[in-house]
Structure formats: structure tokens, C-alpha cells
Amino acid sequence: MEILIYGLINSVSLALMALGFTLVYGVSRLPNFAHGSLYVTVGFVTWLLLNRLGLPYPVAMLVSLVLIALVGAATYQFILVRIRGMAISEIIASYAIGLAILEGLRWGGLKGTTLTLPVFAQGSVDILDVTVDFHRLLVILLGALLVGGLWMFVNHTKLGLALKGMAQDERAALTLGIDSDRMAVFSMALGAVMAGLAALVLMPLGNIVVESGYHVLIMAVAVCIVGGLGSWTGAVLAAFIIGFAQILTTAWMGPHFQVVVALLAIIVTLISRPSGLFGRQKELEERV
Amino acid sequence: MEAVIQSRRKERVDRGIKVRTDGVYAVSSWREITYLVAPRLLLIGGLVLLPLMLSAVPYWQKVLSIICIYSLLAISFDFLAHFVGLVSLGGALYIGIGAYTAALLNTHLGLPPILTIPLATILGGGICTLLLWPCLPLRGVYFAIVSLMFPLLAARVIEALDIFGGTDGILGVVGLPNKWVEMYVLLGAVLIILFGLRRLVNEDVGLVFRGVKDNDQAVKASGINIITFKALGVFIASAMGCLGGAMLSHLYMWAGISQFALDFSIIPIAATVVGGGGTLAGPVLGCLLLVPISELLRDFGTLRIAVYAVILCAFIVFKSEGLMVYGSRKYQQFERWVQI
């Protein structure tokens, strides 16, 4: 029972971490390796606004989300757009940006300390003899809301449909008057906001540390690759597979193996089925 | 009034001396020979004399050894990325495996460094090739991501299983006789590998390698097994990395998890981008520039990682050809404006 509940929570957290990454990749084919650093930045900025400027919690969250959207858009607009389409340069450049942000933050005072964000709701509840605190339940709820909201946005708003169109066929989208560069900037901003939302929801469960940036990146990449790069249903499903696999290994073999599971999942998936569970890159299977 | 639009463009023309030295007549005059040999001699002579020049500052001699280790990694990255077409973001795997192999051979079997280093180079290269073998069919982004995961995985597995000394690492590795041996073995290795690889990529094997990079399907259609050639490329590259790792473990008299750290993956890439990919000498140049910067910034802690990440980013976006390509263009060609 414990495994079921914590597995669910873990899976939803993984899905939250991965959504932004898969969104950006799906729309603009840009593997955003700066994803983890955006995640940590939001946590840190919110903490700063909360504790240094004394803003109320909701306002601080909102401001930091807006800021991170701007950061995401600016990174794309000024740096990544120049190397668009050169896959390796994209990886290296975005990874370098992420590294610069993370290590810059570490230098700027975020050193293995005990900065924490307050939880949304205190207290805990017993579900079938398992004690779960309210915040973890909220994670599940918010995660479901976010996935649902994103689905609604993509399928039922004009902007979302434009994004979807670009993801499916960029040239066709261009002929229909969708500005692909603007959409890519927008998707990057949205991806940053998703990373930020994940941070705001998940960070109160732990400390704000730089290492979580790398952790989030590995997890996001793992989930996206197992699910098939650019596929959302795949990502959510993969989040559940990896999430439960992690909880099971923790229960049976110890917490050290948690990350090993994710890394092994990536390697096994790439070797056996490079386009992932729901990947759409069919040509890839012929090529590799 | 008719507006006269004057437009110009830059034209690049090979220097006369460059054209003359392309042929066999290069040996006909000292000037041509100098033109050909000067850049090579500058590099060789510079690297050979550098330890002597730095003898007043022993700390920087140590840095020079580190530069050489990073250079080995950077050359291997450049070779693998630009001649075989496999972008390996996990240089740390080679360093780590080389370091651990050398340390284990030394502490458990009691072999002296003169045996452990060559053995670790060959064995480590073999181990890395075997580990990466299943991933060899992958290309591009996918190989990059898998290779990035391997060093992380290796570190976690050692930590989790508590093998090879666990988080403490392997202590008590024998050091090298003296610092001159350290430096000259490494410098010699860098120079031999650099010029050897430049030869290799122009041989028949090198042609197949480049074929694999540019169009693997065509190579396959010619009846050549691309996996074998990719494996050979990975073996060459990882053996170079393992040589660096083996030297590193004897240098620090220690092998540990931190040798799988991201530093060893990111600095060689940065050096290759800064120095100019596809030139093999460029990465060495990049290391000669970047590693001292990173040493100067040591006081600022992790800021140095941020700094070279920014340098890397700036180069890849604004000057992606790199210094070496830029330099050799200036050396071999002149530019002039022409009216269109």
C-alpha cells in the first residue's frame, strides 16, 4: 500500500519535472539541457522574494514564474536561435547555459544550506494505514491539474493549436501563417514556466539545493527518452513506469539505486527501442 | 537621381606561398620549408620547453600536467566527434575507468607505474569499448545522451555497491618518480597522439571513419561493417582518455569517484569548441587557454565552471569555427574587398 501511494506521488513528481522538457523538445526539437537550472532558479528566486523582500507567498510565486518565463524566452531569443537545427551545438550550448546558471547560483550563495520553501498545507492524513502529509496529496492533485490544463490548452486554444501544428510539421505551419520563431520562443517560455511550476510544487518537500538541478535534468531526460522524445502521453506513462520502478528499488535495494534505475532505463530504452515507447521518429529506427 | 548601390564582398585568396608549398616543390627553398614547419615546430618546441620555463613556479608545472590530461581527452573528443561522428559527452568515463584500472593494478597486483599506465590504457580502452558497444548503433543526439549518462551511472554504481573503496576511492597509489617524468611522459603522449592521429585520419581507415560520419548507409552499402569501425574509433578515443586517467591516478596517488565528475566531460568539449573542432591541434590550444583560466579562478570556487560554461556558450554561438581554424585561415589566405 505504501509502495502504491508513494509510487504514485513519485510518478507525478517525475511527470511534473519532465513536462517542460518534453514540451520544448516537442515543439522546437530543442533538447533544453538548461531545464534543471530553470527549476532551481525558480525555487531560489521565490525564496529570495519571500524572505528578503517579504512578499506574500502567492505573489512571490507569481513574480518568479513571470521572471523565469522571461529568462527562458531570452535564452532562446538571444542565444539558442542562432544555432537552431545543429543538434550537437544545441545540446552543448543549452547544457553550458544550465551549467553557468547552476554554478553561478552556487557561487552566489546557494551552498548546500537549508533554504526551504514553506509547504502549502500543514498536517497529514492516514490513508489505509499509510501516513501521507497534505502537501504530497496536493502534489498529485496539482500534477493532474497541470497535465489536464496543458492538454486543454494545446487542444482547445488557438495558441496551443499553433504549437501543436509546429510540433507536427514546421513547414506546413509556416505556410499557414504561424511564425515558427515566435512560437519557439513562446514554447521555451512555457517550458520554463512548467519547470517553475514543478519547482514550486515539489521544492517545499525538500531543500533548495543546486544538486537538484542536475537531478531534475537527469530525470526529465530519462522520462522523455523512455516515453519517446516529444511525446506527452509517452512522457506521462514513462513517468509512472520509472516512478514505480524507483520506489520498488528503494524498498528492496536501498535509496542509492534510485538514480541508477533512471539511468539504466535510458540506456536500455535507447539500445532496444531508440524512439521510445510513443516516439514518432520513425525514420530514426531505420537510421540507427 | 539614381541611387548607386555600392556593394562589396570579402574575397579570400590562398597566399602564394601556401600554394607553392602544397606541391612537392616545397623542399626547393628554405622559405617554403619554414612556412610548412614553423607552426608545427612552434607547438612541439613550445610544449617541450614549457616545463623548463615554468620551473620557477612548481605549481604551474602541476597545472601543465593537468593541461596535458585534458588535452588528451579533448583530442579524443575531437577525433570521435569530427572524424567518426560520435559525439561523446562522457569523457569522464574514460578518465574514471583509466584511473581505477591503473589504481587497481597498482595496489592489488603491485605493478609499477611503467606497467600500469600502458596496461590501463589498453585494458581501459577495451572496457570502455565493451561498455559502449551496445550504444554504437546510435548516432547524434542519442549517442550524446547515452554517453553523458555512463559516467554518472558508473559513479553511482561504485557508490551504491561500495566496491573499489566506495566513496573513499583507492588510496595509496604509487606516485611517479619525479615531476619531470610526469610532465614529459604526458607531453610526449600528447604530441605523439596528436601527430599520429593526424596521420591516421588521412589513411584509408580515416577515410572509412569519415564515411561513417558523413553517410553511414553508404559505408554499409559498400559492405563495410560500420559497428566495427565505430568500435575501433571508440577504442582509440577511450584508450587516450584512459591514458590520461591512469596518469591522473598516479599523479594524485589516488583514484576516486570524483574522477567521473562532470569537469572531465565539459572542459574538453569547451576546449574543442574554443580551439576549433576537426583540427585535432585546436583542442590542445583550447586546453592551453582554458585550463589556466580555470586555475586562476580556483579561488572563486564553482564560479570557474560558470565562467567556462559562458566562454563555451559564447564561442559556440558567435565563433563556432574556433581559434585554430581562424588562425590557419589567416596563415594560409589573405582577404580583400572586391566590388560586385
Image (cartoon, rainbow, N blue to C red):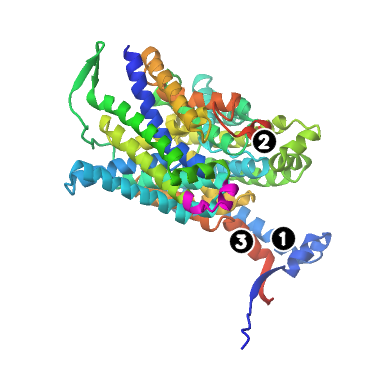
Identify the residue at horizontal 65%, vertical 44% (top origin). Answer: B192
Sequence-wise first label, 3 or 1 = 1
For marks 3 and 1, give the one nearer the viewer: 3
Q: Residues within 10 Å of mark 1 (few under 14, many from 20)?
A: some
Which residue carries the number 3 mark?
A: B327
Sequence-wise first label, 3 or 2 = 2
Q: Answer with the quarter of the image where residue B121 lies.
A: top right
Which residue carries the number 2 mark?
A: B233
**In this rendering, is residue B313 above or below B109?**
below
Q: Residues within 10 Å of mark 2 (few under 14, many from 20)?
A: many
Q: Is residue B129 left or right of residue B291?
A: right
Q: Answer with the quarter of the image where residue A218 lies.
A: top left
User: The residue tagged with tag 1: helix, strand or loop?
Assistant: helix
Residue A89 in view, yes or no? yes
Q: Position of residue B315 (x, y in %)?
A: 51, 55
**In this rendering, is residue B228 above or below B297?**
above
Q: Is residue A176 magenta?
A: yes
Q: Look at the numbered discs 3 and 1 and tell me whether their residues touch, using CB distance below 8 Å.
A: no
Q: Chain of mark 3?
A: B
Identify the residue at horizontal 32%, vertical 45% (top origin). Answer: A105
Predominant SS along the magenta part = helix
Sequence-wise first label, 1 or 2 = 1
Q: Determine which of the numbered discs, if any, sits on residue B36 in the image.
A: 1
Amino acid under disc 1 = Leu
Q: Is residue A160 left or right of residue B87?
A: left
Give the magenta-colored segment's residue range. Answer: A170-183
Identify the residue at horizontal 57%, vertical 49% (top origin). Answer: B283
